[in-house]
Amino acid sequence: MYYPFSWLKTLSRLALYFLAVSLFGLYVDKLPEALALGAFLLLVMQYWSFYRLNRWLWHSKKMTPPKTRGIWEHIYEGIYYLQRRNRNKRKELGALVKRFREGAEALPDAAVVVDANACIVWCNRLARIELGLCWPDDAGRRIDNLIRHPQFIQFFHDGEYSYPIEVISPTNIDKVLEYRIMPYGDKHLLLVARDVTRVSQLEEMRKDFVANVSHELRTPLTVLNGYLEMFGNEGDHYPPAFMQKAFTEMTAQTRRMQSLIEQLLILSRIEASAERVYEKIVDVPMVLSAIKSEAATLNQAKQHEIEFDVDKDLKVFGIETELRSAFSNLIFNAIHYTPKKGKIRVTWKLVNKMAEFAVEDNGDGIAEKHLSRLTERFYRVDKARSRKTGGSGLGLAIVKHVLTHHNSKLEIESEVGKGSRFSFHFSSELTVVNSHAGKSE
Ligand code: ADP
């Protein structure tokens, strides 16, 4: 218990002590000796208390001070009080650091604290995963000895931290990390690394896309330009057969550009479309019957045998323009890429309560290595042949987008020399079957 220190009490106690000693001295008639002995005993007691304090401070494991009385009790209690206050402060500080570390652990980025000598002071869990740091083994080691990428080292030593850099991850060469450095406090640095692989891939795709579109448009424009320059020379006369060829060529190239731009517009419209798939029912048999007549016109040159097996009572919830585009792309591709007098079969039927659309052909088929890339924009197995058919390389990309919008996925089975099968199905929630069942065309 804490008693306030009182000089009066302390001096009264001392006076009482010496009074008792003096009375004893007078009683034995040896006052000076008694006083000397009393003073000596007092000194021994002080040294004893001092010895106990020292033992408690340095050698005892007990938190509470030893019991004593008088002036030493105040000293013991005072030290005990200061110790308790320090312990509580340390606890509060520890809890604060713990909360800060938990916060930093929850960051979606890798974070490393580095001191003025570039040595690691602390790092979070993501830094261990993304940067391959070992904790606590790497504590105190230089960060530029652990992240060895030359671009990072230059960035780290330049001291110009106002912009971030993008560097390949030290743990995975397929990943790109964005490093940011923020100086703070006593020449400390906070290094934050974020996984930007997806962003940089998107950026790459955007660049590729622009390059591809420019390339696709440049080729027909070069042809047109060539002819126009020739015709621009006054006085030159060309034979009618040449003029006819130039006219046919220019018309074909203009159509190619037109079709490319139309396909691009369709693609961007589908990407930006906010139309809801669940609102309208699409009469797929009707859409397929319109495509069938278009296919017949397109088939005149190739004379394929085209069979349509359509369940007339099967409809789906969806967006008609988009689905028309997906169906026709697959059917027209089969016509384009199957050698003359081939066999093509289009089916629209119910399979496991789900509407399924499939186009099969007995064409040349597609090698396995191309299959996973077919739906990429501008991807073509045989560029020259595809151009001849007027293909832009966007058809299957459009199909993929349409199907994603309808929660479906394009499935491609193909074998070189045997043919291909492109199919997809709609979930049972999107499938609509008319009650009066009847079938086939
Ligand atoms: P394109 O506009 O060039 O036809 P697509 O995206 O529609 O582009 O098709 C991509 C590529 O897939 C085509 O270039 C072609 O090589 C191949 N392909 C598509 N359908 C078939 C098919 N039925 N048979 C063989 N190859 C096909």
Image (spheres, rainbow, N blue to C red):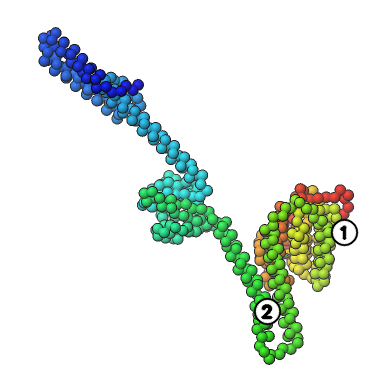
Residue at mark 1:
441
Which residue is at a point 51% across and 44% down the rendered structure image? Answer: 106
Which residue is at a point 49% across and 50% down the rendered structure image? Answer: 110
Q: Quadrant of ligand 1?
A: bottom right
Query: Where's the C terminus, which quadrant?
Result: bottom right
Which amino acid, by three-letter code, is at mark 2? Leu
The yes-or-no answer for disc 2 within 8 Å of ligand 1 is no
Residue 213 place in picture, x, y as percent: 64, 69
Outermost residue toward the bottom? 235
**Is residue 38 positioned above or below 88 on the image?**
above
Tell how many labels.
2
Query: Where's the N terminus, which quadrant?
Result: top left
Residue 333 place in picture, x, y as percent: 75, 65
**Is residue 144 positioned above or below 262 on the image?**
above
Q: Nearer the viewer, residue 16 or 158?
A: 16
Q: Is residue 441 left or right of residue 208?
A: right
Which amino acid, by three-letter code, is at mark 1? Glu
Q: Give the quadrant of residue 259.
A: bottom right
Residue 404 place in picture, x, y as percent: 69, 55
Residue at mark 2:
224
Q: Is residue 93 left or right of residue 213?
A: left
Q: Nearer the viewer, residue 15 or 210?
A: 15
Under circle 2, the secondary element is: helix
